[in-house]
Image (cartoon, rainbow, N blue to C red):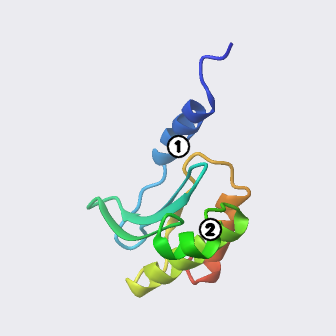
């Protein structure tokens, strides 16, 4: 039997990744978290600990639109939204924090949609 489960592995990978990935004022961090039910994205300035912009499939407009489904299409919509909200706050370049997840599926879809919305990473 393994000492670690999948969630523990993700947390360890994320900790390793966070040693290298830091958000600054000029280039904040775009952090992604996905649960079994929702996907979340935040643009964070790690110097001040401030969240500049955030979007999640938990928001009422997305719950009404997608009816509780969680797939690549929903993640893409969240990526587009976070990109637009960040651009509105004056952020054009970010560092991408995939949160210990594989760059595949919902994480990849969110990142590509954020790029299409005008964010550089």
Please, is residue 47 above or below residue 64 in the view? above
Q: Residue at x 68, y 60 (%)?
A: 106
Q: Position of residue 41 (x, y in %)?
A: 50, 63
Q: Which residue is mark 1?
A: 14
Pinpoint residue 89: horizontal percent, then vertical percent. Answer: 37, 83
Residue 112 in the image: state x and y as whole percent: 67, 72
Residue 33 pos. (x, y %): 53, 54
Q: Is residue 87 above or below residue 6?
A: below
Q: Residues within 10 Å of mark 2 (few under 14, many from 20)?
A: few
Locate residue 88 relative to residue 103 in the image: left or right: left
Q: Quadrant of the N terminus?
A: top right
Marks 2/1: CA distance? Answer: 30 Å
Going 42% across and 56% down the picture, which residue do you hit?
Answer: 22
Describe residue 106's horizontal placement relative to residue 49 as left or right.
right
Q: Circle 2 — which element?
A: loop
Name the one closer to the observer, 59 or 33: 59
Q: Quadrant of the C terminus?
A: bottom right
Q: Secondary structure at mark 1?
A: helix
Q: Across the whole image, how many numbered discs are drawn on residues?
A: 2
Q: Which residue is mark 2?
A: 67
Which of 58/42 is in front?
58
N-terminal label among 2 and 1: 1
């Amino acid at each position: 039997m393994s000492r670690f489960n999948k969630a523990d592995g993700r947390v360890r990978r994320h900790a390793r990744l966070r040693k290298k990935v830091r958000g600054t004022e000029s280039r904040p961090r775009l952090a992604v978290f996905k649960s079994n039910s929702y996907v979340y994205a935040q643009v964070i300035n790690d110097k001040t600990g401030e969240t500049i912009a955030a979007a999640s499939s938990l928001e009422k407009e997305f719950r009404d639109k997608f009816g509780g489904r969680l797939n690549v299409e929903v993640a893409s919509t969240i990526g587009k939204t976070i990109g637009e909200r960040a651009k509105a706050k004056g952020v054009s370049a970010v560092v991408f924090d995939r949160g210990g997840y594989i760059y595949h599926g919902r994480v990849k879809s969110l990142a590509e949609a954020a790029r299409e919305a005008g964010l550089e990473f």
